[in-house]
Amino acid sequence: MDLSTYRIGIIGGGNMGKAIIKGLLAAPQSPTLSAWDAASDCRKQLKEELQVPVAQDNRELVLNSDIIILAVKPQIIDPVMNEIADALTTDKLLISIAAGVPCKRLEKPLQNLVPTIRIMPNTPALINRGISAIAAGSHAQEKHLKITQAIFSCLGETALVPENTMDMVTAVSGSGPAYVFLVIEAMLDAAVGLGLPRDLARKLVVETVLGSTELLKESGKHPMELKDMVTSPGGTTIAGLAELEKNGLRHAFNEALKSACQRSQELGK
Ligand SMILES: NC(=O)c1ccc[n+]([C@@H]2O[C@H](COP(=O)([O-])OP(=O)(O)OC[C@H]3O[C@@H](n4cnc5c(N)ncnc54)[C@H](OP(=O)(O)O)[C@@H]3O)[C@@H](O)[C@H]2O)c1
């Protein structure tokens, strides 16, 4: 989709705001971008390093944008919405990436039936390898979902989901990178524990994780089938797997995802 005809305004130029801006700047047909952030050093960075025009304030940014992306922390969403509500007209699209904030909460201070969309991206978006789950609010139509998919494709993969699954999605792909990093760290330390130098251990672990996920994705096979391929009878892998099962890895993931999902529900209230 040609994004060059759109004016996109980003509110909040932190980690995710900058990742979105970088992704959009690298798009084949970049939109017209502008941004605003409460922090002056961040505004300076946006202007000088990313060459993105900085608005006078959030309200002015909204008035001069077709699509507005809210990339501020969830606890800042309500004050920002109060600041921009009267500038949001039905011809604009409001997208929020704030974790746990439902579209209904965005819609509450609005006098108009403004289309809203809620996104759950994840941190691999920083290198365009993220997955962004996209859920429509009350007044978002097919065309709004299409343009949102085009925007977030600049940060990796996208998936359309019903909004009532967002807490589960948050637990899986939003928080997911942290779980993967913990698993990697645990494998790395265990490798060092065996006596391997840390540099070598890091290379072995990272390439193993990367190669395994690529193989899983490309082959389209079930993970169990690929696991069986490495597991010869009475061999090393089955001995390792038996320890992981005995120590409750599967149970730990079940509990972790349930807990993260529950926390997301609590934060959304
Ligand atoms: N990072 C992740 O893994 C991740 C994943 C999924 C979703 N998200 C969501 O993405 C959103 C942004 O996260 P982040 O990690 O990018 O946060 P961040 O780095 O803290 O960026 C937020 C930026 O917004 C600025 N800000 C504060 N008040 C503002 C206002 N009134 N108007 C405009 N800008 C304002 C902050 O400035 P100050 O520093 O001065 O407050 C900060 O620069 C959050 O809602 C989060 O839930 C993040």
Image (cartoon, helix red, strand yellow):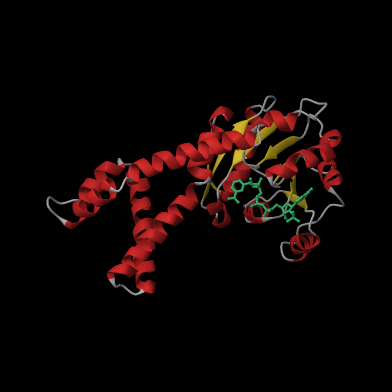
Where does the N terminus fall, quadrant-wise?
Answer: top right
Q: Quadrant of residue 187?
A: bottom left
Q: Nearer the viewer, residue 114 or 148?
A: 114
- Side of 122 where 118 appears, left or right: right
Residue furthest front in the image: 247
At 60% from the left edge and 32% from the top edge, which residue is drawn? Answer: 135
Where does the C terminus fall, quadrant-wise?
Answer: top right
Residue furthest left in the image: 234
At 33% from the left edge and 63% from the top edge, which residue is drawn? Answer: 190
Q: Is residue 168 visible?
A: yes
- Side of 106 where 188 appears, left or right: left
How many marks the image carries: the answer is 0
At 45% from the left edge and 50% from the top edge, which residue is drawn? Answer: 179
227 relative to 181, above or below: above
Q: In which quarter of the image is residue 50?
A: bottom right
Q: Percent from the top left, x then y, of residue 28? A: 62, 52
Q: Percent from the top left, x then y, of residue 128? A: 55, 54
Q: Percent from the top left, x then y, of residue 223? A: 30, 43
Q: Can residue 146 be seen in this view?
A: no
At 31% from the left edge and 68% from the top edge, which residue is drawn? Answer: 193
Q: Quadrant of residue 117?
A: top right
Q: Percent from the top left, x then y, of residue 161? A: 54, 31
